[in-house]
Image (spheres, helix red, strand yellow):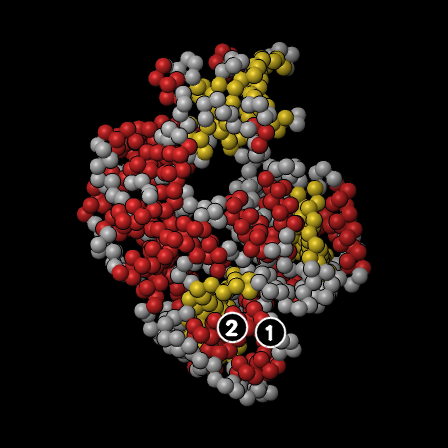
């Protein structure tokens, strides 16, 4: 993508002003450290989560357990109780809103002060973490701000008839303190008539869509007089996000389309034809259609950029292999990047098995059109590594499968024509880029993901990739039944789960038991609050190992307890990512060979592990994993002719959001449906890949699931504008907004794609 020149006007835009100049150092420091807000623009784009109306109270009945909340409610009663034979005092205050009740508890010297303030009938905003004591919801020592009575007439007036913004807050900075900071900033901008604030949307586009100016939208979103104000502001701010992002992606597509690449066409009667002839089954219609799309792309003189997504077990690897064989037929080489090591080895095993003598190029017994298929990982021995490097440099090896080891400087290719990346969320952008740079000309790129992504998400995240979808399962795949096991409420259900495992083993099958943690960590258990996808030591995506909860269950503990307890007499082994590669391989080999009955593992088995005889999976602390991850894990069973069973064990209470999430996973096997649910629950925090590039998401208003129409319309407009003016010379404000979105890191992220 061409460098976007810095703009004179941009330096004068008041939205780029550092917050410390406007709010003072202390508040600015807390905002930067805990909310990621650094400039006036960052704060103004920190939109209210919702609005409370005067006389309308938050539904206390819907409070999520163990989350930090802000509620607007009324004091129903307040009493001081003594304990410890009168030596200790505690204040209990009951809040109500007509839908439910919530208890506030204060201890110690603060009791007297709060008792005087929190009188029955008083109304206020209360913030804290929702806990449970004696089966009742409560906030301990919440922060609060009383509304109305006792405030000056102006403050009362400000609340009367006005929608009250409730901001996404944190323990260090409550919603109302953020509201005061926003008010300070808005007042100072109003005083200058918002002078110098650049509006990224072209005026013609704004008029066509009936959208307000940016200053108007920012004022309405933070100080709405009516619900219509909020709607108008949201419509405009959603357009900003969708449009600027789509302009970035449109420029990316334009730049990619101008790069040269070598066209790779499979030759008749070559390796691909020989491979197809030896397949023991026919391709599904979906596999044929997607292969055609890929072959059409490979035949062009611009680099293919395609996302291949599909259900677990839909045959993505087979489609990718056929693409690699087509490139080898055309005289090129193909590299498959597959983390972690266990997945790379799995791919190497299944690909060489599928190819048979076609993978034995240069060897005795190799077929006429054969090529060499080499494996390169961190644990490849020195002699094998030297041989593999030589085979790649000379072109003897047409296909290489490997981990990060492929990216090292020493690895050189004779003619790299195609890069296949499996499970793109596991790979940093830099690694993908480093591999692509090993081609004499940009190689074609195929990204595979087993986490199905709704079309609009794909359009937002991978706007520069063409998308192919495999939504058909090959014949012979068995159905998987899924059930939630509420271990706390019904311990006998968990006992029954272990009985089911024994029954499956008696019938000649095998089982997985998955835990969120390894169990040999040096840090205290649960110290890491969240562990990202597949983070073995700290719980899965969506995990929260906070202090209030017990540490997540660990493989090493559970394996021992099962072997000595409910699964005594069965052959149980543990598998996790910190084992030595040889030990890991040995356990996987024994499990695949049927020498083990039960494998207790972390998410290391999440992708690529294929044991058709495994029919049951028990996921412990299932609430500590994300929806997509649970779906991925579940796809490891039911891969043979016997039906699969997945048991989601959780101690979360009925009615909690985590339990609802597990219910959704149990209710459907449709990965696309589940990814929608996942996204609606998690929002788009890492939609732009910021999870990889380490920066905040730029999607604060846009919900990619709900705003399909906005995204599609923005994409169409952006494509037209960029085609007419690639450098955006006629739209300096838009160019400035693009600079703000694409700070160096995001620019790099999109560049490397």
The numbered mark, 2 or 1, whose residue comes first in the sequence reads 1
Camera-nearest residue between 2 and 105: 2
Residue 589 occupies which quadrant of the picture? bottom right
Residue in the picture at 37% in, 21% down: 158
Q: Which mark is residue 291?
A: 2
Residue in the picture at 52% in, 42% down: 529
Camera-nearest residue between 653 and 300: 300
- From the viewer's perspective, tell me whether residue 516 is left or right of residue 257: right
Q: Which mark is residue 283?
A: 1
Where 613 sits versus 81, above or below? below
Camera-nearest residue between 619 and 644: 644
Residue 546 occupies which quadrant of the picture? top right
Disc 2 from disc 1: Cα separation: 10 Å
Specify few, some or many for label 2: CA neighbours under 10 Å numbering under 14, 14-19, or 20 or more: some
Residue in the picture at 63% in, 26% down: 136
- From the viewer's perspective, tell me whether residue 75 is left or right of residue 492: left
Labels 2 and 1 touching (C-beta < 8 A)? yes
- From the viewer's perspective, tell me whether residue 256 is left or right of residue 81: left
Specify few, some or many for label 1: CA neighbours under 10 Å numbering under 14, 14-19, or 20 or more: some
Residue 44 occupies which quadrant of the picture? top left
Q: Position of residue 132 (x, y in %)?
A: 62, 29
């Amino acid at each position: 993508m061409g460098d976007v020149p810095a703009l004179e006007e941009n330096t004068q835009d008041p939205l780029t002003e550092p917050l410390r100049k406007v709010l003072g150092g202390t508040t600015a420091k807390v905002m930067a450290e805990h909310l990621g807000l650094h400039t006036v623009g960052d704060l103004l784009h920190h939109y209210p989560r919702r609005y409370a109306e005067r006389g309308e109270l938050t539904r206390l009945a819907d409070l999520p357990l163990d989350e930090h909340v802000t509620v607007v409610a009324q004091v129903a009663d307040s009493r001081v109780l003594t304990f410890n034979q009168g030596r200790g005092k505690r204040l209990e205050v009951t809040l109500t809103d007509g839908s439910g009740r919530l208890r506030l508890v204060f201890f110690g010297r603060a009791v007297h002060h709060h008792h005087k303030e929190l009188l029955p009938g008083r109304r206020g905003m209360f913030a804290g973490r929702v806990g449970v004591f004696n089966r009742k919801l409560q906030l301990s020592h919440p922060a609060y701000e009383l509304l109305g009575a006792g405030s000056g007439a102006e403050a009362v007036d400000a609340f009367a008839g006005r929608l009250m913004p409730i901001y996404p807050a944190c323990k260090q900075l409550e919603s109302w303190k953020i509201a005061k900071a926003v008010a300070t900033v808005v007042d100072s901008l109003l005083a200058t008539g918002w002078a110098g604030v650049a509006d990224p949307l072209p005026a013609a586009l704004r008029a066509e869509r009936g959208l307000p100016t940016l200053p108007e939208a920012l004022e309405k979103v933070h100080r709405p007089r009516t619900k219509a104000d909020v709607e108008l502001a949201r419509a405009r701010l959603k357009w900003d996000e969708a449009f600027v992002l789509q302009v970035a992606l449109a420029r990316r597509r334009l730049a990619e389309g101008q790069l040269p690449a070598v066209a790779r066409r499979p030759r008749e009667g070559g390796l691909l034809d020989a491979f197809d002839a030896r397949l023991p089954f026919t391709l599904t219609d979906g596999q044929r259609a997607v292969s055609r799309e890929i072959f059409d792309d490979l035949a062009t003189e611009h680099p293919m950029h395609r996302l291949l997504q599909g259900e677990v077990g839909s045959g993505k690897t087979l489609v990718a292999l056929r693409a690699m064989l087509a490139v080898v037929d055309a005289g090129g080489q193909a590299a498959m990047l597959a983390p972690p090591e266990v997945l790379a080895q799995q791919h190497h095993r299944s690909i060489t098995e599928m190819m048979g003598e076609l993978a034995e190029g240069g060897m005795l017994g190799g077929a006429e059109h054969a090529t060499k298929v080499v494996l390169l990982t961190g644990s490849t021995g020195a002699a094998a590594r030297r041989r593999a490097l030589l085979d790649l440099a000379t072109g003897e090896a047409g296909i290489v499968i490997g981990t990060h080891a492929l990216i090292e400087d020493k690895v050189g290719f004779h003619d790299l024509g195609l890069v296949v990346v499996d499970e793109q969320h596991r790979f940093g952008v830099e690694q993908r880029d480093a591999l692509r740079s090993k081609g004499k000309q940009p190689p074609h790129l195929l990204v595979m993901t087993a986490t199905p992504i709704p079309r609009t998400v794909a359009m937002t995240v991978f706007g520069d990739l063409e998308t192919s979808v495999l939504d058909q399962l090959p014949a012979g795949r068995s159905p998987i039944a899924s059930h939630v096991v509420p271990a706390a409420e019904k311990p006998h259900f968990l006992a029954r789960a272990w009985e089911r495992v024994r029954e499956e083993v008696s019938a000649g099958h095998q089982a997985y038991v998955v835990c969120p943690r390894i169990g040999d960590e040096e840090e205290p258990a649960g110290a890491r609050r969240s562990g990202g996808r597949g983070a073995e030591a700290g719980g899965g995506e969506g995990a929260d190992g906070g202090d209030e909860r017990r540490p997540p269950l660990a493989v090493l503990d559970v394996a021992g307890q099962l072997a000595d307890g409910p699964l005594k007499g069965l052959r149980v082994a543990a598998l996790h990512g910190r084992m030595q590669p040889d030990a890991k391989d040995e356990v996987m080999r024994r499990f695949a060979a049927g020498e083990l009955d039960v494998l207790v593992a972390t998410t290391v088995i999440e992708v690529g592990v294929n044991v058709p005889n495994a029919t049951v999976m028990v996921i412990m602390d299932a609430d500590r994993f994300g929806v997509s991850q649970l779906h991925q894990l579940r796809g490891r069973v039911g891969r043979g002719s016997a039906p699969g069973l997945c048991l989601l064990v959780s101690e979360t209470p009925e009615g909690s959001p985590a339990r609802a999430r597990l219910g959704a996973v149990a209710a459907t096997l449709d990965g696309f449906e589940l990814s929608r649910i996942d996204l609606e629950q998690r929002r788009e925090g890492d939609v732009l890949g910021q999870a990889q590039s380490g920066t905040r998401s730029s999607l604060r208003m846009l919900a990619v699931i709900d705003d399909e129409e906005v995204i599609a319309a923005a994409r169409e407009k952006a494509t037209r504008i960029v085609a007419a003016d690639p450098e955006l010379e006629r739209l300096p404000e838009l160019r400035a907004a693009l600079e703000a979105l694409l700070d160096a890191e995001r620019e790099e992220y999109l560049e490397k794609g």
